[in-house]
Image (cartoon, rainbow, N blue to C red):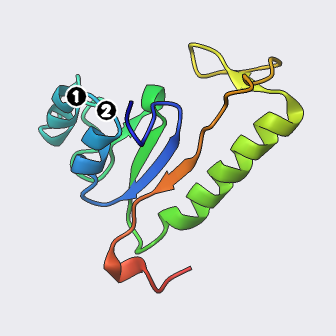
Amino acid sequence: DYAIKNGDKKYSYYREHTHAIASGVDPGAIMAELFMKDTGTCRGAGGSMHIFDKKTYFQGGWALVAEQLPYACGAAKSILLDRAMGLSDDEEIIKQNVAPGADDDRVSVVFVGEGGAQNG
């Protein structure tokens, strides 16, 4: 097991390539994105700025310093709402009216650098 799990919601900033790899995003898809290939995480449209992977719940590439912080807080709240409302994601990452398992330990993870530590 890893500390960061596939179902955890992960948010990073610009130059998020290593965070994406640590979060389980396919390194080949990340490299393809950097070289603007159709097989990239955003089909080459994001370049080095935007790495996004739906199946690992990874979203990166925020342009403003510490901009990802409120999104990660909202993701944490959405996890709590899923539990309270009895909702979970299916294999296609679409909300279903099925309660998460009793062992649901998802968290929201935010990567932030020292420059953004004083923001928020």
Horizontally, residue 119 falls left or right of residue 46, namely: right
The answer to whether 45 appears left or right of 84 in the picture is left
The residue positioned 67% from the left and 31% from the top of the image is 104
**From the viewer's perspective, is 120 left or right of 113?**
right
Task: Say which quadrant the N terminus sits in.
Answer: top left
Task: Write the residue at 80% across / 42% down.
Answer: 81
Q: Name the residue tied to disc 2.
A: 25
- Is 71 rendered above or below residue 65? above
Q: Nearer the viewer, residue 68 or 114?
A: 114
Where residue 37 appears, as percent x and y from the top left, is 17, 29
Whether the residues at callouts 1 and 2 have beta carbons within 8 Å, the answer is yes
Which class describes the residues within 10 Å of circle 2: few (<14), some (14-19), or many (20+)? many
In the image, 88 versus 1, the foreground residue is 1
Badge nearest the viewer, 1 or 2 = 2
- Quarter of image, res 106: top right
Across and down, in percent, residue 93 comes to 59, 22
Residue 51 numbered mark, or none: none
Q: Which residue is mark 1?
A: 29
Q: Amino acid at mark 1?
A: Ala
From the viewer's perspective, is 44 left or right of 70?
left
